[in-house]
Amino acid sequence: MFQYPLGFLRLFSLLDGLSFIILLYFSLYEKMILGDETAVSIPGRIHGGIFTVFVILLCIAMVMRKWPIKRAALVFVCSLIPFAPFFLEPNLKAEQNGSKAGN
């Protein structure tokens, strides 16, 4: 999985999806229902760092693998939708393993 750049992109895509779901929990339950105004500060920073690394890896993968902008945009949009990175993972894995599923 840890092949550069696509393996790291896959890893950070999954981490981004997981941290996004955790951030949604803290923002909806802890902050809105329980009223803790500081509940999202730490999870938000962690998610922001993971997302930043993800975007950098996406740019690197786009250049190194010569992805069209449409493909890179699809991967980026999947990072903005909860649970979408988990559905994108098999496609990225197939591309990393050498099949033409990602193109």
Image (spheres, rainbow, N blue to C red):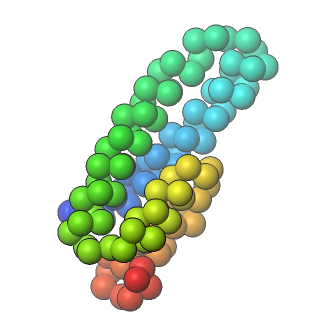
Instruction: Specify whether residue 51 is in view.
Output: yes
Residue at the farthest right position: 33
- Res 48 → quadrant: top left
Residue 54: where, in percent of width, then height?
A: 36, 49
- Out of 61 and 99, give the one closest to the viewer: 61
Q: Residue at x 58, y 33 (%)?
A: 23
Find residue 7 and report its image quarter.
bottom left
35 relative to 79 in the view: left or right: right
Locate the N terminus by quadrant.
bottom left
Compared to residue 75, the image places residue 51 above or below, namely above
Could you tell me which residue is drawn at 51 percent across and 52 percent down? 79
Q: Which of the pair 61/26 is nearer the observer?
A: 61
In this rendering, the answer to whether 38 lies above or below 48 is: above
Q: In this view, does 27 lie to the left or right of 76?
A: right
x and y, in percent, of residue 43 in the image: 50, 27
Q: In which quarter of the image is the C terminus?
A: bottom left
Instruction: Please state the horizontal and vertical placement of residue 34, each as a whole percent of the image.
Output: 75, 15
Q: Which residue lies furthest to the front in this view?
A: 69
- Judge whether residue 3 can be spotted in this image: no
